Image: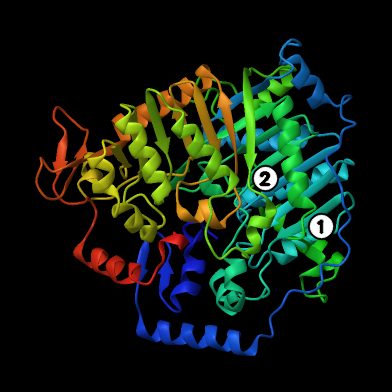
Amino acid sequence: MTASFTRSPLLIAHCLGLRLIAMGQARVDLRLAAAAFVLVLAGMLVGCASLPDAGQRPVSQARTDVADTRLAAVAAASMPAAGEQQSGLRLLPAGDQAFEARIALARAAQKSIDAQYYQIADDASGRQFLRELAAAAARGVRVRLLVDDLHAAGEDALLVGLAARPNVELRMFNPLPVRDGGVAARVLFSAHQFSRINRRMHNKLLVADNAIAVTGGRNIADEYFDRSGPANFIDMDMLAAGPAVQALSAVFDGYWNSEQAYPIQRLVDPSLTPEAARQQFDAAVQQADTAELPVATRDPLGQSSVGTQLASGRLALHMAGVRVIADAPAKANGDDASPTDGAVMNGKLELLQSARSEVLLASPYFVPSRRTMAVLKQATAGRVRVSVMTNSLATTDEPLVHVGYARYRSALLDMGVSLYELMPGAEDTRAAAGELRGSLGRLHAKVAVVDTRWLYIGSMNMDRRSAHCNTEMGLIVDSPELAGQVASLLRGERQHLSYEVRSNGGGQGLQWIAPGGAEPVVFAQEPNLSWATQLRLSVVSVFVNEELL
């Protein structure tokens, strides 16, 4: 399952038959629409799909008896004793090192691994990750894994096979009542519970021995770790040690013990026995690429890999004050008919409101609410420089979301916001002119830098879905060093990899300025937008509420 289906199945159910297909193409087919309508109507009328009783869900908490673990010793050696109120942090901007960090922590864990993810794909990265969790459990490590149920289609045997091992517990968050078929089919036949299944756990977190954690924007799938051929995500994670880890563990415990978390065994076909599932799991993970993929000696910030530093007994960390913000699991209930911003959106907007000189904001999906627009207008009116970086139509994996964003471009420019859209294949000027070539990078990082001092990093996009429907989590960090690193990366990508969008010289329309050669290339029409694509998106967007984008 590729990340291009992140939102599409839920939009399908909402549109009753508008089929969104992978890699950004949307198409209306009357036969598909009619068939989908019949499927949804049948599911709603029959109403036979419902969740089973969750059964016993033993309450458990993060391990605290970890002072004698190797990771706790490394964390203590990496931070000054005087900085008890601060946490030790390092950015993970490179995909290869971000994956290596997760694997290194899983291998080093001695007592516990707690992980929660929106998506763990059934690909090389997903299988290797699950294999490392199984290996840790075999060493006696307690493993608790919480996975959002939306993208788990077809993975029951894999997940049950892991859960059948000693020392492993696996729970699914906010499960769909239908388990058979692909993601789209499961959503269609679960449409009678749309208000609930539309709300997903978007969190990303791994905690090893309650001593070191990794959180940020990456799911567990090849495209997040530069392992997906020509198309990969540009993303960002944070590794943390110190007080922030205990706060993150508390967030995990809240989700793990919530009523929305179902033991995987209660959901699957009872004919799938633990022994059969274990055999399928072993066969599947052994098919994963067992070769250790090369990891760059240094990442874009000049940092060596986490595994290398763990082996030395010390991590190179920046000391900083950290505030962990997270939505409550109950946000996924869908009981509140009136959309309200969750805790993470509240925290992020409050951070933006505190700006005195500059805001740098990156979000792959940017569909601002009325409140977000008011905050940005207040900032620019106060002479704060505001820059927003997001995907262009050519690089987004969610074209309908791009349509939602495009409605606000002129208003954002009029209030003084600078807009940058990631170019496709930016190393080749022909790609900027509409010829897609070579590697296609897609922005997926969700970060904000305020006054080159404050940094937000987490799972939340700047859109209505993240604010009102999905659960999210993030870190607000007080660190000029880390904020400066992120600002440097964003400015570098803006200058070399993005169109700058401007108003068309006081007249109607917009311009896209692509850097390249001696002179920038200026486009009077949106690059890579054909009339056929424009027509398809215009038709489909009529049926989609912005609250779903």
Q: Is there CB contact under 8 Å for labels 2 and 1?
A: no
As drawn, the label of residue 173 is none
Tell me where residue 98 sits by quadrant.
Answer: top right
Q: Nearer the viewer, mark 2 or mark 1?
A: 1
Secondary structure beneath label 2 = loop
Which residue carries the number 2 mark? Answer: 290
Q: Which of the two residues, 453 or 81, is positioned nearer the viewer here?
A: 453
- The residue shown at (47%, 85%) is 37
Observer-nearest of 543 and 536: 543
Percent of width and height locating residue 119 = 61, 54
Q: Residues within 10 Å of mark 2 (few under 14, many from 20)?
A: few
Q: For label 1, count other residues whose C-alpha is less than 10 Å away and answer few (under 14), some (14-19) or many (20+).
A: many
**Horizontal side, residue 285 vs residue 263: left or right:** left
Q: Amino acid at mark 1?
A: Ala
Which of the pair 286/226 is nearer the observer?
226
Q: Is residue 356 left or right of residue 107?
A: left
For the question of whether residue 151 can be seen, the reply is yes
Eyeballing the image, is 471 above or below 240? below
User: Which picture quadrant has residue 163?
Assistant: bottom right
Is 515 placed above or below 435 here?
Answer: above
Q: Residue 191, how many percent across, how many down?
A: 57, 76
Q: Is 249 situated above or below 383? A: below
The answer to whether residue 368 shows anywhere in this view is no
Q: Where in the figure is residue 241, as x and y percent of width and height?
A: 71, 26
Q: Amino acid at mark 2?
A: Thr
Q: Earlier in the sequence, mark 2 or mark 1?
A: 1
Question: In the rendered image, which residue does mark 1 sit on?
Answer: 163
